[in-house]
Amino acid sequence: MKYTMITTNYAEQQFLETTGVVNSTPVGNMNVVNLYPEKTKQSMKGFGGAFTEAAGYTVSQMSEEQQKEIAKAYYGEEGIGYTLGRVSINSCDFALGNYAYVEEPQDFTLETFSRERDQQYVVPLIRLAQEAAPGKIEFLASPWSPPAFMKTNEEMNHGGKLKKEYRKLWAKYICRYIKDCHSQQINVTRITVQNEPEAVQEWDSCHYSGEEEMQFVRDYLGPTLKEEGLENIKIFIWDHNKELLYERADEILSDQKASRYVDGIGFHWYTGDHFEAIEMVGEQYPDLELFFTEGCVEYSRFMDSDDVYKAEMYGHDILGNLNAGMEGFLDWNLVLDEKGGPNHVGNYCAAPIHLNAANGTYEKRLSYYYIGHFSKFIKPGAKRFLVTRYTDRIEVTAWINPDGEQVVVLLNRQSEDLPVVLRHYGDGAELVVKAHSIATVRITK
């Protein structure tokens, strides 16, 4: 067997390749990472990012050729292998302002429903990705807020709740959105009930308790999707931070009628690792799809961190989530401007690619390559397999692709090089994972 080792490190060597042979003689017992490809776990659904209005607007400021390059960098065959996308139902904070598809409070038939706003920047960005992608992109759609008139606080920002008398109409509204996307060949296959239902934000937000989310799924969203011929659309609950993942899953799925409509659970990273929560949910509810639905490096907390720190946040979290059972990964904004926006309330963040329209340039940040060490090589349909490792200073996840290729991702966040012996039942290869680097090893016959 032979291997190719692809390395990206803090010295900005990106996707540097070396090759070698997996020895057919014993490699010893020290510095070992054991591989057990016969011991498989979850399957990978894919990787992707969010098509926000901010991303679409920013890309639109670049030349036509640059727009295509950026789309190919994510979704093209020469890119980092994205096959999934996230879209917002109505506006989110990374929009140019609040907007909804219906603004008329008396429109109980959704006659005035219009996604004209999405046609300006969101849909063109989707089209660029679709043109670049070798296959079909699947989208997960999430609402940040219903229209203001449907909410108790009469505005899209600052939380509030969905008024009880609008629950059925809101469910129909979501169905209308999905059908409208499908009519434009935007393949929405999954929805979340509410982005960050526990958060009351200064931007677009809406609060649901666990009981309220359960009731909305059970009595309105699930039945309405079925009535509208959309029962194949997968409903995801929670879509918020991992520290309450298990509690929210248990609160909603303990209702048997509601649980029949729920296909997955989404989680974010903003409150820390909590990888055990993913594992607990997977063990308790093995039929649920487990998706990371949002994460980014917030400038409000990490403005002074360098690119290595930001990239290693991604590497550590993706790797830990994968080993806990994650099946799909959706980063936040695909691209942002040089300030980390636009954002209609100034909630600026980092993205893997930043653009500067003023001078007509764009930059792939180190995080782009760190994400790519997973997304480019772990293919849809790949199965995770088990490993053991000699130290917690090296972080490891391992996968077997549908074609039989083994993919091992190794993350070294230490300030010194670490030796690694990849071993399968005594035979293997001796490697060195450089300080502050990530390496993907592809093993083929």
Image (cartoon, rainbow, N blue to C red):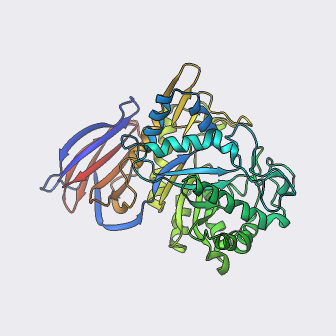
Task: Say left or right for 350 vs 404.
Answer: right
Q: x, y (%) of residue 170?
A: 76, 62
Task: Say left or right for 441 vs 199.
Answer: left
* Towards the viewer: 335 or 104: 104
Q: x, y (%) of residue 323?
A: 44, 59
Residue at far top of view: 359
- Mark yes or no: residue 319 visible: yes
Q: x, y (%) of residue 217?
A: 69, 70
In the rendered image, the quadrant that contains the N terminus is bottom left
* Towards the viewer: 59 or 438: 59
Residue lying at 55% horizontally and 53% vertically, measured from the top left: 186
- Is 328 placed above or below 210 here? above
In the rendered image, the quadrant that contains the C terminus is bottom left
Q: Quadrant of residue 16?
A: top left
Residue lying at 58% horizontally and 40% vertically, measured from the top left: 297
* Towards the viewer: 232 or 279: 232
Q: x, y (%) of residue 368?
A: 46, 38
- Mark yes or no: residue 417 visible: no
Task: Say left or right for 372 vs 95.
Answer: left
Residue at far left of view: 25
Q: In which quarter of the image is residue 349?
A: top right
What is the count of numbered marks?
0
- Is 183 placed above or below 413 here? below
